[in-house]
Image (tube, rainbow, N blue to C red):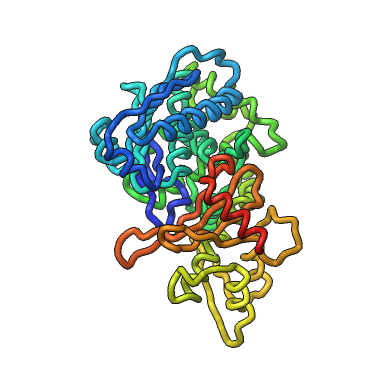
Amino acid sequence: MRRPAPSPRRARAARLAALACALLPLVAASAAGAQGGTFRHETEHYRIETDISAQFTRLVGMHMEEIFKEYSRRFAEYGEVRQRFNVAVFSTEEGYLSEVPPQVRGSTGVFIASKQLLAAHAEDRTPEEVLRTLYHEGFHQFMFEVVSREAPIWLNEGLAEYFSEATWNGREFELGQVPTTRLHTVQQALRDGSYVRIGQLLTLNPDQWLQNVRTDAHRASLHYSESWSVVHFLIHGDNGRNASLLNDYLREIARSKPPERAFADVFKVDAGTFERLWGAYVMSLEPSPKFRCRDNMEALMLLAEMVYESPTEFEKVSDLRRKVLYTSGYHWEITRPTGQKVSSQDRQQAEALFRCPFDEGRSSVSYVVVRHVPTGMPILICDHHPGVVLKAYYRNDSPGRRRIIVEEEVRETLDPNLAQAIMAAVADR
């Protein structure tokens, strides 16, 4: 199921599109692919093919095997899977479009049931984005081939989004993450009444879903985020008591029971009661610490743009902190993607931008700056997260246009030079 690529401002927000997913790859992917050659790698459950590099192909295989374990735990009763699934990742959008149906133009990833193929492209994407697309589309592939071809569209997409938000820490996946912008989208819709009524969501068919998300980008975002939130509620709400009932619900659907009736019979509530319980749960949620840290890092990069004439002048976070908090007469305000404003007038809120929620030390600054050696541009680093490092940096999309990228990378895969630079910066903090 495909989804068009997100706009720069909402790249981390809700995956805005239609029956698919969208995100992806390596900074050097296009150059690597242009050199020619196909790289193949087989794992227990996947047959991976890319035109990027042997290393990247193996990385995809490792991540797909690990996320497959999470799919299988959620649907353990469906037994052992003996087949291998096909995954193709292209370095360019052109290569991707040559293999996928014309109606998915604009997407960056899709599961094509007729070909039994998960395809994605890696043009102008980060490695994290590539992998999150594969987690999402990989679930659609798993659902179709292993669990059920009758799954309601809201549940199929909601679970795919749920898995796409998983954090790989080098040892295992951490599920149940709550992204800031996705949560804001649903909470705001609950406040103003623009959310999709649960009774309507349960009965949407794929054609209706596709029509809705194609005609309105905001509604597309809401469809995906609301479905994610319902799945999150079923898995984690009420101390997880309803998580095991998802299989029962799918079985009732497979027996041709109407979706609303199947839902009521399995979860023992009508759509109206469920909507009230779900709404209260969503309004009680807060963004996960990892996402609060990512928000902080994006905000600090915005502040650095305001303070320094050139990004290369941004050398120490402590210097930036002094300039924006203690310069007499200096007033500023930034607006987050959620619309929340942070300003120099609220000292406590402003100071919190410089602290990672995972940082248990006493320092007022959690972050460090290292240099991208070829360009001298700053890379903002947080090294307080289990198994991963968060990075924020500027990317030039075109002459005169620069945007902020925040991504995470497993510590074990860090470039040795970057890892050494981070150690030195942390020691000097």
Looking at the image, which is closer to me, 95 or 154?
Answer: 95
Query: Where, quadrant-wise, is the N terminus in this rendering?
Result: top left
293 w.r.t. 143: above or below: below
- Residue 118 falls left or right of residue 380: left
Residue at point 42%, 24% (across, down): 41
- Residue 175 falls left or right of residue 406: right
189 w.r.t. 401: above or below: above
**Do we see residue 370 in this rendering?**
yes
Looking at the image, which is closer to me, 126 or 37?
Answer: 37
- Residue 65 falls left or right of residue 359: left
**Horizontal and vertical percent position of residue 125:** 39, 46
Residue at point 62%, 38% (across, down): 174
Looking at the image, which is closer to me, 130 or 363?
Answer: 363
Residue at point 55%, 81% (across, down): 331
**Do we see residue 208 in this rendering?**
no
**Horizontal and vertical percent position of residue 208:** 36, 37
Farthest residue, direction bottom: 329
310 w.r.t. 151: above or below: below
Instruction: State the image quarter where residue 428 is shown.
Output: bottom right
Looking at the image, which is closer to me, 299 or 239?
Answer: 299
